[in-house]
Image (spheres, rainbow, N blue to C red):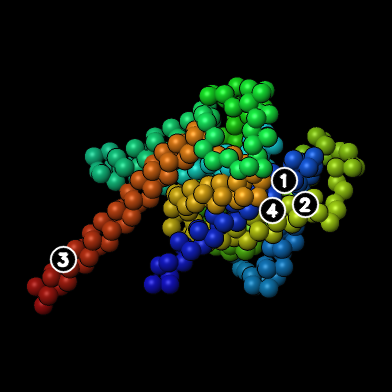
Amino acid sequence: MLKELKPYILSIFCSFCYAGYNIVSKVYLDDGMSFYVLVVDAHGFGTLATALLDLLFERNNESNLSIQVSRNIFFLGLRVRLKYTSPTFASAMANAIPAITFILAVLCRMEKLKISEASAQAKIVGTVVALAGATLMTLYKGIVVISLPSSSGHHKKNQSVGINSTFFSDGDWIKGSVMLFISYLALAAFFILQAWTIKKYPAPITLTFLTCLAGTLLAAIMTAILDHKPSSWKLSWNISLLAPVYSGVVIFGITVYLQTLVIREKGPVFMTAFRPLATVIVAVMGLLILGEEPYLGSIMGSVLIVFGLYAILWAKGYEKKKKVLELMVTDQHTRMEINSQK
C-alpha cells in the first residue's frame, strides 16, 4: 500500500513546494530584484544541494553518461515570468501544464490514444476543457469575489485606473500571460525529455545534479549578457537570499528529484495532473499573506481546468485497471493451456 501511495504523496508534496515558490518569487521580483540573477543563483544553490546528495547516495553510480544523455541534460538545463502577473494567476495558468504535457506525450508516442475508447475520449475532452479554462483566466477578469479590508483601498485604486475591467487590457498582464504560456510549454517539454532521459540514465540524484549544473552555466551566460550590473548580484539577509535558496534547494533540487522518481514510475502525465492543488494553496496564501484579491475569471477558469485535468487522471486510472484485467485474463488462459497439455 505504501508503494502504491508513494507517487501520490510525492506529487502532492511537490504541489506545496510550487505554491511556496510562486509566493516567494513574486515577493522577490516585486522588491525590484533581477529575474535573471534569481535564475542563476537558484540553479547555483540547487547544484550545491544536489552535489552533496549525489556524493552521499550515488557516488558509486555506474550509469553510462552517453552523448545522447549529455545532450538531453543540456536541454534540460535550458528551462530558464511572474513579474507581470499575480502568484495566483501564475499558479492557475500552470494547471494547463498537464494538458500540454499530454498533447506532447501523444505526439511523442508516450501515450496511446484510441479514439473509440472511453478513456481516450475522456483524455481529449479533459485536455480541451483544461486549455479553455487557461484561456479564460488569461482573457477574462470579472468582479472581485473575496476582498479583505486591508486591500479595499488597493482595489479602489485599481478601479480608478481601469484595471478591474471585464477583460484584461493591461499590456503588462498580457505580456506576462504570454511569457507564462511559453514558459509552461517549455516546462511540459522538460517533463517529456526527463522521462526519456531517466530511462537511459537511471540515476535520479546525479541526473538532477547535472541538470542544475547545466542550468547554472547557461543561465550565467544569459545573465552576463542581459543584466551585467554588479548591483543586481548583491544578496542580503532578506527575500533576496531566501528566494534563490528556496528556489534552488526546494524546487531545482528536491522537487525536480522527486518528480524524476514519479515520472520514472507513473509517467509525466500522471505527475503533472496534481498541479491544480498548487492553485488552491497559492490562492489561500495570496489572499492571507499578500492580500491578493481573487477574481471571478480566475475561479471560473480554475474550475474548468481542475475538471479537465481530473478527467485525464480518471482516464489513466481506467486504462491501468483495464491493463491489469487483460493481464489477469491472459495469465488465466496460459494456465489453462498448460493444464490441458498435462
Task: Report whether 176 appears left or right of 33.
Answer: left
- In space, the residues marked 3 and 4 are separated at their CA atoms by 53 Å
Decide: marks 2, 4 in contact (CB < 8 A)? Answer: no
**Viewer-nearest residue: 287 or 333:** 287
Name the disc covering residue 247, or none.
4
Secondary element at image label 2: helix
Q: Please report the residue visible at 70 percent of the width from the left and 47 percent of the height from the top.
A: 25
Judged by depth in the image, the label closer to the viewer, 1 or 3, is: 1
Name the disc covering residue 264, or none.
none
Mark before the other along the chain sequence, 1 or 2:
1
- In space, the residues marked 2 and 4 are separated at their CA atoms by 12 Å
Q: In the rendered structure, which amino acid carries the disc numbered 4?
A: Ser
User: x and y percent of residue 172 in the render?
Assistant: 67, 27
Mark before the other along the chain sequence, 1 or 3:
1
Secondary element at image label 1: helix
Mark before the other along the chain sequence, 2 or 4:
2
Decide: marks 1, 2 in contact (CB < 8 A)? Answer: yes
Q: Please report the residue visible at 59 percent of the width from the left and 27 percent of the height from the top.
A: 164
Query: Would you name the residue on which mark 3 appears?
Result: 333
Q: In the rendered structure, which amino acid carries the disc numbered 3?
A: His
- In space, the residues marked 1 and 2 are separated at their CA atoms by 7 Å
Q: In the rendered structure, which amino acid carries the disc numbered 2?
A: Ile
Decide: marks 3, 4 in contact (CB < 8 A)? Answer: no
Judged by depth in the image, the label closer to the viewer, 3 or 4, is: 4
**Viewer-nearest residue: 144 or 319:** 144
How many residues crowd mark 4 within 10 Å: few (<14), some (14–19), many (20+)? many
Q: In the rendered structure, which amino acid carries the disc numbered 1?
A: Val
User: x and y percent of residue 198 in the render?
Assistant: 54, 57
Decide: marks 4, 1 in contact (CB < 8 A)? Answer: no
| Viewer can see residue 45 | yes
- Up/down of 148 relative to 139, above or below: below
